Image (spheres, grey):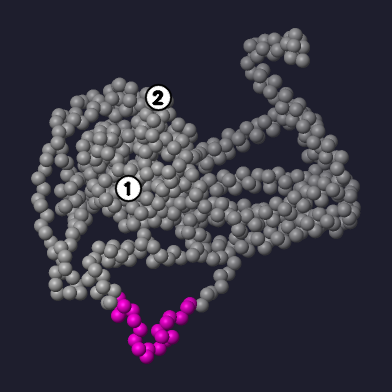
């Protein structure tokens, strides 16, 4: 067959026509679509005529009933889980009347992580001497023992009576969908009866189905809008738009089904079947125009093309870029070779701590010499964080961050007009936005700009974990930042998303301990992401401490809420998780939380080192063929 086509000379004629008139290819495509598109519609119409009309109506109504019943079940029982709303989101929906029951209150005294006072008490008793423990136990026992003869029932508080919750709007919607589905099923069963009342029942079932679908669309669009209006930090614009886009995709088949049923009810054959009328209707003319192309098929197909292209140009960018896909995170285009900071060790004499004694509250005698932890004292933090080394020589001018050997700075395969961005990860259960904004994260970006000259984004950003996979391949963020002072609640799908980002995409998770019980939450999170990898100490000679600034003693401890050493997870030779236990973000803030300018400078330098390490590791993986083993 192919040989026959080649010998016929049609291909040569086609090529000659295109050379003579390049726009002729549009005409060929136009005619092909008009011929095959119209033929496909005619074929479907002819094949469907084999099925009796009443059976087609019955099947259509059953599908409509099933679809609206599914919509009611999904919105009432699965929508909150599918959208991965946090407890704070559900609480907002409850207050707005969409959800009947509020989320269960967290038991703050259930664990040491959620009860800092209980944790501190337990640690104190664990470190106490046997005499102290015995006295403390006796005291607690006396305080908790009941008084003889006392009426215990009077002292016990009465349990609050449970108040019934009125159904929320999502719950009430399911009742209406059941009514609409019931009407569709009843109309389907009576569709075989050729009577006028059956036709009116068909119209009533269609109207109920249409109202139910419109109600579902209203809820699917209103709920995200309410959450975004209530608190854009807990539920940002991207999350709202993602649900809107998914809802449009879900309701597209509903719209097609509704149009087909409306067209069927307007056909004269259906109306004659139920003894309504015999004249030609608008539905007959629409079907005939689709099937034959009307009196001028070429004009009709041109009109379809124009409308279709206009809709595509208007809607496609909104769907594919503005809602579901993230803008690429590109490295700065250019070429650079940073100058390493050569340092020499400078021993700093530190005053010896004076011995301090503690008196046992329960005894007039001194029981032991206690080790008082004054690490949170600013003066000691200054002494522990200050440089123990000085630059041996000033940095040479001309060397800027990047790769390629140039002096302008940047990476050869970076993106033109790219800007350095700082992106936080959002999560439920804690204060992910601690110190976020112009006063902390953005100060690091400004410092990065002053040192490198690279352009920076106009503001700091945040994304839910689920958005990490929405960045284009090879253009995801080289690092993302995570901080807080309380718990971290993430779903199993978020854990899988983080692991994919860190392992497959080669990104880095930069974690900073903001105080409180965040250290325990971080260790649990990391154990869920990498259950088979140890949380290791990052040695002082690691490359992350060498470029562009040198830290011979490793990461400065700062406030060290969770120890004095930075830890992390390695994948091969690459650091995939960098965890600083000392609230480095606090030193980036305006005023540096009381720390000196020298301490703040150390914090900025360490932040720049981590960012630069992530940029180089990401570039080597995606544009130089490097592996996690370090080879190429």
How many marks the image carries: the answer is 2
**Residue sitting nearer the eye, 330 or 283:** 330
- Helix, strand or loop for disc 2: loop
x, y percent for residue 16 = 67, 10
Q: Is residue 13 left or right of residue 327?
A: right
Q: Is residue 410 magenta?
A: no
Q: Residue at x 45, y 35 (%)?
A: 505
Magenta span of residues:
140-160
* Up/down of 23 relative to 309, above or below: above
Say which mark, if any, is on residue 512.
1
Give neighbour class at mark 1: few <14, some 14-19, many 20+ (Cα, 10 Å).
many
Q: Residue at x 43, y 86 (%)?
A: 153
* Up/down of 391 relative to 360, above or below: above
Q: Quadrant of residue 2?
A: top right
* Foreground label between 2 and 1: 2
Q: Residue at x 15, y 48 (%)?
A: 383
**Residue sitting nearer the eye, 385 or 356:** 356
- Helix, strand or loop for disc 1: strand
Q: Quadrant of residue 416?
A: top left
Can you identify the residue that label 2 sits on?
632
């Amino acid at each position: 067959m192919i040989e026959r086509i080649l010998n016929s000379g049609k291909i040569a004629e086609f090529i000659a026509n295109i050379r003579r008139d390049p726009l002729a290819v549009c005409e060929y495509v136009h005619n092909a679509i008009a011929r095959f598109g119209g033929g496909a519609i005619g074929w479907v119409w002819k094949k469907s005529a084999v099925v009796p009309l009443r059976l087609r109506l019955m099947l259509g109504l059953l599908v409509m009933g099933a679809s609206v019943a599914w919509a009611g079940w999904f919105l009432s029982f699965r929508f909150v889980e599918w959208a991965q709303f946090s407890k704070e989101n559900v609480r907002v929906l409850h207050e707005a009347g969409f959800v009947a029951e509020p989320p269960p209150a967290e038991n703050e005294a259930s664990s040491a992580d959620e009860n800092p006072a209980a944790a501190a008490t337990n640690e104190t008793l664990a470190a106490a001497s046997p005499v102290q423990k015995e006295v403390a136990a006796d005291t607690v026992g006396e305080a908790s023992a009941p008084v003889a003869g006392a009426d215990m029932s009077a002292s016990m508080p009465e349990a609050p009576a449970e108040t019934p919750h009125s159904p929320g709007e999502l719950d009430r919607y399911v009742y209406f969908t059941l009514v609409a589905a019931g009407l569709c099923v009843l109309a389907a069963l009576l569709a075989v009866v050729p009577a006028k009342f059956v036709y009116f029942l068909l119209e009533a079932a269609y109207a109920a189905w249409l109202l139910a679908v419109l109600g579902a669309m209203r809820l699917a669009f209103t709920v995200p809008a309410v959450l975004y209006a209530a608190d854009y930090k807990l539920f940002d614009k991207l999350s709202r738009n993602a649900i809107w886009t998914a809802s449009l995709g879900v309701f597209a088949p509903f719209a097609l089904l509704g149009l087909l049923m409306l067209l069927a009810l307007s056909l004269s054959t259906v109306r004659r079947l139920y003894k309504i009328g015999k004249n030609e209707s608008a539905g007959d003319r629409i079907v005939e125009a689709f099937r034959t192309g009307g009196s001028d098929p070429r004009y009709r197909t041109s009109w379809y093309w124009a409308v279709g292209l206009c809709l595509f140009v208007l809607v496609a960018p909104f769907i594919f870029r503005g809602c579901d896909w993230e803008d690429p995170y590109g490295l700065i285009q250019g070429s650079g070779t940073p100058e390493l900071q050569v340092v020499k060790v400078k021993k700093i004499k530190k005053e010896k701590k004076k011995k301090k004694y503690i008196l046992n509250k329960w005894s007039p005698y001194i029981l032991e010499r206690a080790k008082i932890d004054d690490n949170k004292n600013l003066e000691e933090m200054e002494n522990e964080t200050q440089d123990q080394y000085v630059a041996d020589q000033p940095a040479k001018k001309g060397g800027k961050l990047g790769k390629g050997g140039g002096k302008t700075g940047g990476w050869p395969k970076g993106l033109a007009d790219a800007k350095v961005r700082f992106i936080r990860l959002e999560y439920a259960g804690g204060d992910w936005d601690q110190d976020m904004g112009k006063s902390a994260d953005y100060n690091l970006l400004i410092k990065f700009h002053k040192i490198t000259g690279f352009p920076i984004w106009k503001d700091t950003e945040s994304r839910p974990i689920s958005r990490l996979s929405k960045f284009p391949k090879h253009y995801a963020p080289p690092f993302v930042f995570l901080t807080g002072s309380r718990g971290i609640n993430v779903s199993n799908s978020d854990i899988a998303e983080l692991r994919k980002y860190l392992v497959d995409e080669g990104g880095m998770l930069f974690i900073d301990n903001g105080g409180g019980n965040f250290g325990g939450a971080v260790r649990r999170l990391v154990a869920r992401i990498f259950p088979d990898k140890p949380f290791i100490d990052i040695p002082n000679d690691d490359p992350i401490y060498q470029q562009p600034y040198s830290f011979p003693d490793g990461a400065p401890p700062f406030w060290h809420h969770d120890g004095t050493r930075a830890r992390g997870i390695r994948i091969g030779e690459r650091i995939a998780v960098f965890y600083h236990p000392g609230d480095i973000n606090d030193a980036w803030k305006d005023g540096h939380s009381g720390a000196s300018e020298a301490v703040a400078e150390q914090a900025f330098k360490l932040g720049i080192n981590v960012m630069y390490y992530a940029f180089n590791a990401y570039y080597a993986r995606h544009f130089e063929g490097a592996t996690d083993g370090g080879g190429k």
